[in-house]
Image: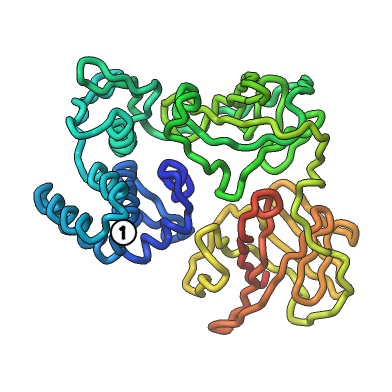
Amino acid sequence: MKIGEFAKMCATKISVLRHYDKEKLLVPAYIDRFSGYRYYTSEQILTFHRITALKKAGFSLPEIKELISSHKSNEEIAEVFLKREKTLLQTLEHLKEAGLMMTNLQILFTDKQAIAELPPDCTFIEACTLAEAQIKAADYQRVSQYKSVDGMLRCDVVKLGTEVDPPEEALPFVNDERVVGKWEIIGIYAVREDFYDNLFCVKNFYGDEQKHLYFLPDGEKYWAFSWTKGVLNTPVNNEYELEQIGEDLYMFVALKEYEYTRGGVPSCLVLKKEDSEHYTADDLARTDNTDLPFETDERIIGTWKAHSFLGYLQHKNDFTTEAEPIDELYFKEVTFFADGNCRVVYEDAVFEGADSVSWTKNYLLRHWNRSACEYEIRTADGNDYLIVEWKSGDWRYGGYDTNYYVFTRA
């Protein structure tokens, strides 16, 4: 799975995974040499949780690396924890959690259930926490609450398979005035009952910065989101239900994400209503000043063809002339005219004309979405490379850093 999906499964930030990769603590199983994308396996989820537990217990990254990579026996690990307990009494609770996570709960997977004997020194919640990581690492999805029956921990599971893209279906808009406005993202749960029990909440949804979702009047789309009565579109159709709990209105969304695309069931996204304001996409968008005076730049004039794309894991300084061209890029071509006019070609649209797109020295100005994309030209091996900021919906609405397109002269 890609690093973004792996981060969601582990409830962590992409930046944390990149740091672990740099420190050789948790190295991606595969890195695509064309795009630079990092891929992880489900089995690595357990390693991540072990690293997290050890960090909470006060171990340094070098110590964790040694513990993780040396394949110590349970007895050796227990001895390490005993020594640490004597010197770090204030972290006793975290040590208990770390020691628990280093224990292998013996889980039996039947056709539709995961079953394990409850460890004698674990509380029910501790055993559930340990099982949660190991179920994911074994490439299963939990689809029910945990239950304790005759000293055994049980839950229903689904074995995940090959990832497929769910169909996208355009639905006619039907109004539901109750949902219009701003909603706080409470989190994502395996099942709805986990929300009621306040257990196993994953906070991040479409990036760590996303704290709210907006349902705009008439189902207006912003970023990747639109809606109609009973459905949140992401653009997959995710059915929702509303429930009044005390004075608060909650929305429970059957979220068709990573597990669902691999033969699992929708997870449960929980939102809480904050207000009923009639926001617009323009109200929410991050914008630049595109009303900049024209200043010429002789180097830029002419037509440039897209060469490659620097994605979320890369900065413009990561580009090297050894990077191979990538076919079928979305942003295909840009022409800079001497008078400041511009023409850009995307996969599904062409923009030109001063009211739509123009340029000035150091900036490509996309007036249609109010973004000023900084550019620079680098010369290497006798060739010019144009590197341009790509301010997509992720940048405009999601708080993400900008991406970069690389072009060569046509």
Q: What number of labels is visible? A: 1
Residue 106 placement: quadrant: top left
Rendered location of residue 225, percent (x, y): 68, 36
Residue 190 placement: quadrant: top left
Residue 47 seen in this snapshot: no
Q: Viewer-proximal residue, 100 or 159? A: 100
Rendered location of residue 66, percent (x, y): 21, 62
Question: Is 270 placed left or right of 376 in the picture?
Answer: left
Please tell me which residue is depicted at 29% across the width and 28% down the height of the picture.
124
Q: Mark 1 points at which residue?
A: 58
Residue type at tag 1:
Gly
> Which residue reaches farthest top?
150
Please tell me which residue is depicted at 61% across the width and 22% down the height of the picture.
239
Q: Viewer-proximal residue, 173 or 200? A: 200
In the picture, which quadrant includes the C terminus? bottom right
Please tell me which residue is depicted at 68% across the width and 53% down the height of the picture.
392
Q: In this view, does 133 lie above or below 22?
A: above
Rendered location of residue 402, percent (x, y): 63, 61
Local crowd at mark 1 within 10 Å, few (<14), some, or many (≥20)? some
Q: Is residue 364 above or below residue 68?
A: below
Q: In this view, does 70 lie above or below 206?
A: below
Q: Viewer-proximal residue, 378 or 216? A: 216
Q: Give the structural element (helix, strand or loop) at label 1.
A: loop
Question: Is 235 placed left or right of 130 in the picture?
Answer: right
Rendered location of residue 64, percent (x, y): 26, 59
Please tell me which residue is depicted at 52% across the width and 27% down the height of the picture.
268
Q: Viewer-proximal residue, 131 or 160? A: 131
